[in-house]
Image: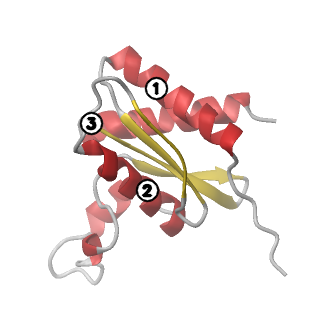
Amino acid sequence: MLDIKRLGIDDAAKLIEGARRHANDIGVPMCIAVVDESGNLIAFERMDGGKASSISVAQNKAYTAGAARKATHEYNAACVPGNLVFGIHTELSVVGGGLPVWAGDACVGGIGLSSGTPDQDMACAQAGIDYWAAHSQ
């Protein structure tokens, strides 16, 4: 029998809140997605002004981070022609902005953001995780 830890709706709200705060601070309205450890969507927010084209991108980033337990930018660095991982971009997002969420040694989900540059998306995702970590328990 498996004992699985996963994010709940309250956790997702905290992750979104932290990401939204940072997005507001940098002046970039974002699409924010939070998934469980299997990559299934828990919560999504499109800030006013978030790009419509970023809705699915944010969800794909969150899926990759949660289900594959790896930051999307790490796949980006490895996904080059000639590398054994090349081609994984057909199934997983390799654009920066998706981060796994860890509780101790367990990946409990993922967060994905889109609408800014990859660096802005990554910073907002990390801000969401930092806010969640500071306001959990």
Q: Secondary structure at mark 2?
A: loop
Q: Secondary structure at mark 3?
A: loop
Q: Is residue 115 left or right of residue 134?
A: left
Q: Is residue 17 left or right of residue 98?
A: right
> Where, by quadrant of the figure, is residue 63 drawn?
bottom left
Which residue is at 54% across, 61% downward? Answer: 40
Q: Is residue 41 above or below residue 132?
A: below
Query: In the image, residue 48 lies at what x, y percent?
Result: 34, 23
Which residue is at 23% across, 80% downward? Answer: 83
Which residue is at 54% across, 27% downward? Answer: 18
Real-space Cα distance between discs 3 and 1?
Answer: 12 Å
Relative depth, front residue between 44 and 101: 44
Q: Secondary structure at mark 1?
A: helix
| Residue position for label 2 | 71
Q: Is residue 80 above or below residue 46?
A: below
| Residue position for label 1 | 20
Real-space Cα distance between discs 2 and 1?
Answer: 19 Å
Relative depth, front residue between 94 and 28: 28
| Residue position for label 3 | 115
Q: Amino acid at mark 1?
A: Arg
> Where, by quadrant of the figure, is residue 92 drawn?
bottom left
